[in-house]
Image (cartoon, grey):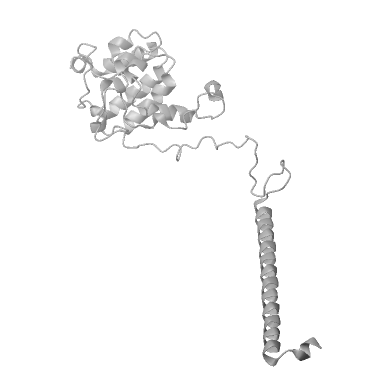
Amino acid sequence: MFIVSLNDTTIVLFVLASITSFIINAALLLNFANIKKFMLNNDEEYEDISDDAGVSDDTGDADDTGVSDDTGVSDDIGDAGDAGDYDDAGDTGDAGDYDDAGDTGDACYSDDAGDAGDAGDAGDAEITQLDLITLSRCNSIFWKNLSYNSHAVDLLSKRFEYEKSLSDEEYRKMPSKYKIDWVALSQNNNAIELIKERIKYEKTLGDEYIYQNISEYSNCKNKIDWSYLSSNQNAIELLRDRFKYEKSLGLEKMSK
């Protein structure tokens, strides 16, 4: 036999080489098996992630998160950053500081004032009480000129309520163009009810109250002016009541 003729050293070397070859082959097989297992695990994890995210092979399927490709996702309209938050301090900045443009950081630029978001359809919507309140706090409207407007009586009424809420200091520091002109309003044919409210309010101020002057009129204060009210065609009832009141005072008091 060939093996019998080999010496002991050759036999030992042959056996060691066989064992080494077996170990190397076994290591390679084990490494290959580990690589395959790793790849399978990655595939399973990828499938799990895809399933959780709602990813499907069909291009029309929406994922589980509810996000779809359609463009119908709309913002919640009317979000005005806590809509209706107004500056109750009179929107006059620090102690009534105004610039010429009338920008006083007031609430008239609130998003609530007609932000419909949909193709501008709010332009045809009816003006609500909230709209009037929002506009009444706006110190960039020339309220002096608006006092002549016979179609703005509801808005002027809300402005009157706002002006009454101001302190006397805040009211006096407000430029005249941003306040109701009561001499002008005395001539407004549609403002009779508002004029009545103002007359009652002026009585509460007392006879010692000092009204501000109006530069456009000679010797006129910013209050109901009965001489201009006499030109108001709807003021006959008020003029009658005024006549009775003055008659009750007597000539001496009327002359004061």
Viewer-closest of 164 and 124? 124
Q: Say if 242 sits above or below 82 in the image.
A: above
Percent across and percent down for residue 179 are 30, 23
Total tally of numbered discs in the picture: 0
Residue at screen point 41% across, 27% down: 135
In-image side of 89 versus 40 (left or right): left
Q: Is residue 125 visible?
A: yes
Q: Residue furthest right?
A: 1
Screen quadrant of the N terminus: bottom right
Dividing the picture into quadrants, the one containing residue 45 is bottom right
Residue at screen point 65% across, 56% down: 49
Residue at screen point 23% across, 28% down: 173
Residue at screen point 65% across, 46% down: 66
Dividing the picture into quadrants, the one containing residue 41 is bottom right
Viewer-closest of 21 and 188? 21
Dividing the picture into quadrants, the one containing residue 92 is top left
